[in-house]
Image (cartoon, helix red, strand yellow):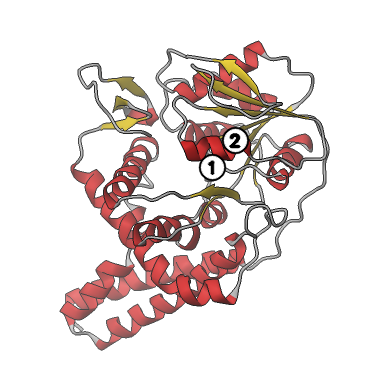
Amino acid sequence: MNVLGATGLGWVVLAGGFSTVALARLSRRRRAVVPTRVPVLLLRPMDAPTERELENLSRPIDYAGPLEHVVLSPHRPRLPEGMRWLQSDPAVPNRKVGHLLHALETLPGDGRVVLVVDADVAVTGALVEGLAAPVATGAALSTAVPTPVGERELVDRAVAGLLRRTHHSFRALHVMSAGAKAVCGKSLGLSTRAVDELRALADHIGEDLELSKRLHARGLDVTLCEVPALVPMGPGTWGAALTRFTRWMQVLGSHRPGLYPTVPLLFTPTWPLLVLSLLSGSMWLKAGVMGLLTVRTLLSWRLTVLSTPLPLGEGRGEGRGTWKDTVHHVALDWLLGEALLLAAFTSSLVRPPRVTWRGRTYALHSGGHMSPVWMELRGGRG
């Protein structure tokens, strides 16, 4: 076997072992959601909502306990009856954190569990219960797995495949996290201890990563909600998808430089190894790559079963896999998702250390700190 083949085979063993461990951990029995009716303050920070986000806000939430639903925005959006608007226009770099801190200083706590959910998430009663229950029973932070639904075009399937069917699914990231748990800031349940830590993160772009890191350093629990956070998808473009995940890679490089190289090594090795197996001509490497494809397809299958929800409005939102979904999507979508993440990682290598987020451009600094770039007046939506 030549050097190229031997190198590739070592890479296959490393990536295959990583996938096998993830599959084993995801096969464990899931923790049951603890029923709760604790009072909840649900905060929805936003700046310029889209029509789809306004549609999400209008969905009824079938939570059995007391629930106050508050939108935090500079201007009053179109809201259904019974939903409260709190004017908020923070001046800090991370406007999401600024919205949240303003709300917590303005609204009475009254012992309620605070949930923070982005406007692109379609909140259900099950999600409220799943996020609130761990915090009510002592967890410092709860987080839900962002689960894109309603994908139609190929680019939408790539995005959904990346977040639902690859190692970059937050369900897989959570079980494989060494140290601080992987957290997605789209849907969070916050204890008072988490809120105290959040007050220092108004200049961090990855406040969810930093919050998890700080809570872990204090020996506090971060819990994964078993109910997915459903994110209805609209028509997307390859350029927008690549920009979004390139920003994620840049933030990862700023926050966790030690984990940054693991993206090509462990999270996106399949396509490079396929090419390497063809170039090397090694039958051992080709056999290894076929084994890796098998393990990753089984992992994707398991993630699909865990993350496929009932249609919105037809149940409580727990994950249910279907044979039709699995047969039609699992193999192609995880390969598309892995290709998208690999392209985003490659793009992040050549980008300057700045990101455009929520319509503003920031320079990235060590530890996820950011500062406004005032000469850049234009930017895409975050």
* Residue underneath mark 1: 183
Which residue shows up at 26% across the image and 88% down it? 283
Q: Which amino acid does label 1 sit on?
A: Val
Vertical placement of residue 209 versus 286, above or below? above
**What secondary structure is marked by label 1?**
loop
Which residue shows up at 71% across the image and 37% down it? 139
Rendered location of residue 1, percent (x, y): 21, 84
**Cα distance, mark 1 to mark 2?**
23 Å
**Marks 2 and 1: in contact by CB < 8 Å?**
no
Determine the image quadrant of residue 133.
Answer: top right
**What secondary structure is marked by label 2?**
helix
Q: Can residue 266 be seen in this view?
A: no
Vertical placement of residue 59 versus 85, above or below? below
Vertical placement of residue 254 versus 201, above or below? below
Q: Which amino acid does label 2 sit on?
A: Leu
Vertical placement of residue 352 versus 155, above or below? above
Among numbered discs 1 and 2, the one appearing first in the sequence: 2
Rendered location of residue 225, percent (x, y): 66, 48
Which residue shows up at 56% across the image and 55% down it? 171
Q: Which mark is residue 57?
A: 2
Of residue 344 and residue 318, the one placed in the foreground of this image is 318
Disc 2: CA contacts within 10 A as few (<14), some (14-19) or many (>=20): many
Rendered location of residue 372, percent (x, y): 30, 19
